[in-house]
Amino acid sequence: MSIVVDLSGLLKLIGVEEEASRAEEAARRVIGEVVERCLSRFKVSRSSSLLYEEVFCHGASPYDYGRICRCIEDYERELRSKLSARRHVFFTFFTDKPLTNIQVAVYKVEEKLDQPHLVTGRLCRAVERIYGYTADRIGANRLVFPLSGGEELPESLRIDAADVSVSLRLEGVKVLDPSIPREANCLKRLLSRAVKARLRLKGFTVKGLKAFWRDPAVEDEKVEVRRGFEFSVLVFSDGEAALALSPRSEVSSKMTLWEEYGCSPDRLKASSRRLHGRAAKRIYDGSVIRILGVEDATVGESLGQSVSVIGRYESLGLLAKVRVAEGEPTVVGLSRGVVVHEAPSALKLIYTLRDLKKMGASSKVISFLHSPPQTWLEAAKELLKAIGTLELDGETISFVEEPPEVELL
């Protein structure tokens, strides 16, 4: 596997992008820390360019993928925390009962899969999206389905989803044991999926492990701010479980990227280098991408793909949400490590606190971004009310509204 470091984005985060000597040293130290913390067991090699540093990890198996990703995410979170001038708050809400009686049907994937952890994870998400069933993986090649009680279980299943077709064979029914790490992780993911599904049902925008209220909490002439939380489910060896919530605010432009540049293809293309590394939100699904640049090709051209950007939007039924002009240049970006092509009218720039200060954002926006912990605690309780009571294997689960502690980091 390989880890790609966006040097432009990294240096903007550190705040030394305009000082060449300090920038080079800072990037070298950060990448060295990633290698030492997360890749020390492996042989590594590097490849550098003007915009990226790629670290190749030799000998890593699919089983190492999740551990390495979590390690890098933890380090990035720590780095952002250290470089922020604001204090960070998170709240922990425990479930009203331990997860010690969650019964699941276990199905084994009959086919041999390349990268089984990745494929089974995609299958679970696709099964939930297409068929409406909650599923998760356990180990490398097994899927589990929580039972609702009394249903007849088919001996075999065929699932065609996520560009994969697999056969599943019933191995049996079991109660997940939270004292076994892989079964505790399965419980954690099942509860996390249930939380996400409920929040989406209640109108929240949920992407990854972040959930935002759909309507802005505050806005001015230039930007709109949405309140939200990054969340994670914790499951302990005795079955006790909790939801950890960390406040997050999403500050985006009120104009699309196309409007920001006066609907001018030339102005937008001339700003391609300046836009590199900037975060932008897709207005049709709330996902955040990292902009790589602006192409000469328009959204009506195929750009070497089977369909144009407009053609893809049309096939997905997105043109009702996004008004796209044929002459817009194509924006290239990264979404979860995958290169994507978008219309600038489908994107809104995401702003940092540093951006807002340069822009002269209104005092009410700045004040909101410095909301005290008590304000966030009330918002967390509001989020819990939206989640309400969940169900796994016929067991009703809810979160106790009073957190045992508030931690300031």
Image (cartoon, grey):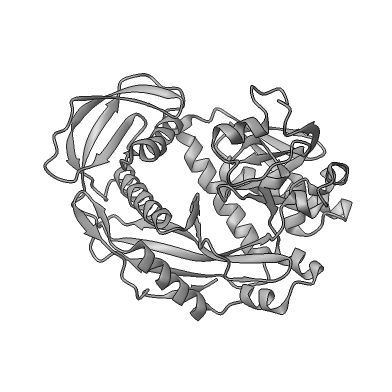
Is 196 located above or below residue 406 in the figure? above
**Above or below, comparing residue 171 to residue 180 in the picture:** above
Residue 201 location in percent, x, y? 39, 54
- Identified at 87% across, 46% down, the residue is 267
User: For the N terminus, which image quadrant?
Assistant: top right
Camera-side residue of 319 and 20: 319
Quadrant assignment, res 84: bottom right
Quadrant position of residue 340: top right
Closest to the observer, 188 or 236: 188
Question: Is residue 31 in sight in this rendering?
Answer: no
On screen, residue 66 versus residue 326, left or right, reads left
Residue name at image x 27 percent, y 50 percent: 178
Q: State the image coordinates of residue 79 (x, y, percent, origin top left).
A: 64, 58
Query: Is residue 61 visible to us here?
Result: yes
Residue depicted at x 80% and y 51%: 25
The quarter of the image holding the C terminus is: bottom right
- Describe residue 376's horizontal placement relative to residue 310 as left or right: left
